Image: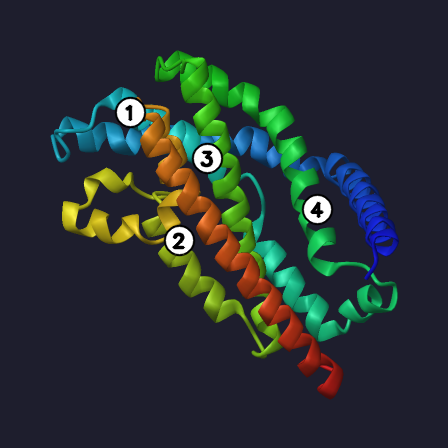
């Protein structure tokens, strides 16, 4: 492919990304029920965790954890965990494969992965616009945490990459449907692992140190726990750079895996007409 064709293809992909983003942005705005659920469900879930942990902390079950840390941790972890309907997207990809919908993408030469990525970007754009002020107010009032600029920047970078990594893994789970009749079993199994090992259910610091060392080499903590913990533990730049590098490495691995599964899956799709 010569330079002219590369430039032409780049402009084509860019236009597809722009059009897909605008279309999904309008769809996200029109889906008021889901937005309403997130706006009011977020503080409701936060208070549920608050009263649960209030009882736990009063019994001194975790003496090293302070109430302000717990409130701040769940304020941000819940904010990140409901940023996008990852499970639904994985199921939609499965439906696109088995209904033959991806044939439309192939016929129109539309990059399936990029179109889906733009849906993710558009959805979180609306989410961040409306839910971020709520999270910021709750964080300041109840946790009394207002991070300085360097800490906030590190959190935003790690939080963004962690969310992209999480999306990419769920995207891969959807693509696995090329090889399985149903992916609900994989979804259930992975969701259990992610909730436990990412810090969604419990801060990872409550686990034994040996177990934490194992989690340090896995990608799950990088999705949620690491970005959130950055806000509260005065993370040094060297620790930030290590976590940033690990996120990039894991993201590269997952994207390469997604490309391989997509390429091989299309062969199966073309051969058998799934």
**Badge 4, how many Cα within 10 Å: few under 14, some, many 20+?**
many
In this view of the protein, can residue 43 be seen by the observer? no
Instruction: Give the mark nearest the N terminus, 1 or 3.
Output: 3
- In the picture, the disc for residue 194 is 2
User: Regarding mark 3 in the picture, which secondary structure is present there?
Assistant: helix
In front of the other: 241 or 192: 241
* Residue at 62 percent of width and 55 percent of height: 89
| For discs 4 and 3, the disc positioned in front in the rendered view | 3
For disc 4, the marked residue is 119
Compared to residue 100, the image places residue 160 above or below, namely: above
| The N terminus sits in image quarter | bottom right
Instruction: Give the mark nearest the N terminus, 4 or 2.
Output: 4
| For discs 1 and 4, the disc positioned in front in the rendered view | 1
| In the displayed structure image, the side of residue 88 where residue 229 appears, left or right | left
For disc 1, the marked residue is 233
Instruction: Give the mark nearest the N terminus, 2 or 3.
Output: 3
Q: Are marks 4 and 3 in contact (CB under 8 Å)?
A: no
Instruction: Give the mark nearest the N terminus, 1 or 2.
Output: 2
Q: Are marks 4 and 2 in contact (CB under 8 Å)?
A: no
Instruction: Give the mark nearest the N terminus, 4 or 3.
Output: 4
Question: Residue 106 placed where, x, y %?
Answer: 81, 68
**Badge 2, how many Cα within 10 Å: few under 14, some, many 20+?**
some
Outermost residue, front direction?
2
Where residue 83 sits, quadrant-wise, is top right
- In the picture, the disc for residue 158 is 3
Residue at mark 1 to residue at mark 2: CA–CA distance? 23 Å
| In the displayed structure image, the side of residue 40 where residue 233 appears, left or right | left
């Amino acid at each position: 492919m010569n330079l002219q064709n590369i430039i032409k293809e780049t402009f084509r992909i860019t236009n597809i990304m722009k059009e897909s983003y605008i279309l999904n942005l309008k769809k996200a705005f029109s889906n008021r029920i889901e937005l309403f659920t997130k706006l009011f469900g977020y503080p409701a879930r936060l208070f549920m965790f608050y009263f649960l942990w209030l009882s736990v902390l009063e019994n001194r079950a975790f003496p090293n954890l302070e109430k302000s840390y717990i409130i701040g941790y769940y304020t941000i972890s819940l904010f990140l965990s409901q940023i996008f309907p990852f499970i639904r997207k994985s199921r939609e990809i499965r439906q696109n494969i088995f209904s033959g919908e991806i044939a439309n993408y192939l016929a129109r030469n539309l990059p399936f992965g990029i179109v889906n990525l733009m849906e993710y970007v558009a959805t979180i754009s609306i989410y961040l616009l409306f839910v971020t002020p709520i999270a910021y107010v709750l964080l300041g009032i109840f946790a009394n945490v207002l991070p300085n600029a360097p800490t906030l920047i590190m959190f935003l970078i790690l939080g963004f990459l962690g969310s992209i990594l999480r999306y990419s893994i769920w995207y891969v789970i959807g693509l696995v449907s090329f090889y399985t009749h149903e992916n609900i079993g994989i979804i259930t199994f992975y969701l259990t692992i992610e909730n436990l090992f990412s810090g969604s259910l419990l801060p990872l610091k409550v686990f034994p140190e040996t177990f934490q060392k194992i989690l340090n080499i896995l990608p799950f903590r990088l999705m949620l726990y690491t970005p959130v913990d950055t806000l509260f533990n005065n993370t040094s730049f060297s620790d930030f750079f290590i976590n940033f590098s690990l996120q990039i490495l894991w993201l590269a691995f997952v994207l390469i895996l997604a490309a391989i599964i997509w390429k091989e899956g299309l062969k199966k799709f073309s051969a058998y007409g799934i």
